Structure formats: structure tokens, C-alpha cells
Image (tube, helix red, strand yellow):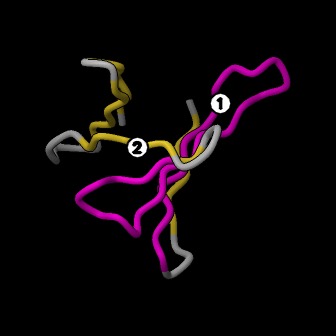
Amino acid sequence: MRGTAQGGGLWLRYERRPPWQLLPLGADLFTVPDEPTRRVRFSREGKGKIRALELLCPDGAGQHFLR
């Protein structure tokens, strides 16, 4: 899992899939245009540094990735 900022946007590459563009829904919550029910949420530590990423599915399932 790797996130990058390019072309004025935020992108996420997950395994060998094509990169997902992330569109903001809130401060640390994003959606994926090609999968509008999928959510990506970043978790931060006390000083604001990103510590984890969660991939959330509409059925409540998800995956958690620590930094």
C-alpha cells in the first residue's frame, strides 16, 4: 500500500491494482471515483502524523494497514 500526491491529487496504490485517485469527503476520509461505495480513512497519532490507513467496504468489512 502506497500513497502519493501528484497532479494536485492524492493517489493510492494497492497491491498490483491500478492506482486509485482519492477524493476527499472529510478531513481524513476519502472515496474512490471508480468504486463510490469504498472509503479510505487515515488515522492520526496525537501530533497529527498519519499512523494507519483503513479500506472500508459498504458491508462494514475493512482492512487496516499500520504505517
What residue do we see at 59% from left, 40% from top?
A: 42
Q: Earlier in the sequence, mark 2 or mark 1?
A: 2
Give percent across and percent down for residue 57: 46, 70
Q: Residues within 10 Å of mark 2 (few under 14, many from 20)?
A: some
Q: Which mark is on residue 51? A: 1
Predominant SS of the magenta segment: strand
Q: Which mark is on residue 23? A: 2
Q: Which residues are magenta?
A: 30-58
Give percent across and percent down for residue 35: 29, 63
What residue do we see at 28% from left, 54% from top?
A: 33
Q: Quadrant of the N terminus?
A: top left
Q: Is residue 30 positioned above or below 35 on the image?
A: above
Separation (CA) of disc 2 from disc 1: 20 Å
Q: Which mark is on residue 17? A: none
- Residue furthest to the right: 46
- The quarter holding residue 10 reads top left
> Which callout, 2 or 1, points to the residue nearer the camera?
2
Give percent across and percent down for residue 17: 16, 47
What residue do we see at 47% from left, 58% from top?
A: 39
Q: In the shown orientation, is residue 35 left or right of residue 3?
A: left
Q: Is residue 17 positioned above or below 19 on the image?
A: below
Q: In the shown orientation, is residue 56 left or right of residue 45?
A: left
Residue type for callout 1: Arg
The local secondary structure at tag 2 comes to strand
Residue type for callout 2: Leu
Give percent across and percent down for residue 47: 81, 17
Q: Nearer the viewer, residue 53 or 8?
A: 8
What residue do we see at 65% from left, 30% from top?
A: 51
Q: Residues within 10 Å of mark 1 (few under 14, many from 20)?
A: few
Is residue 49 in the magenta section? Answer: yes
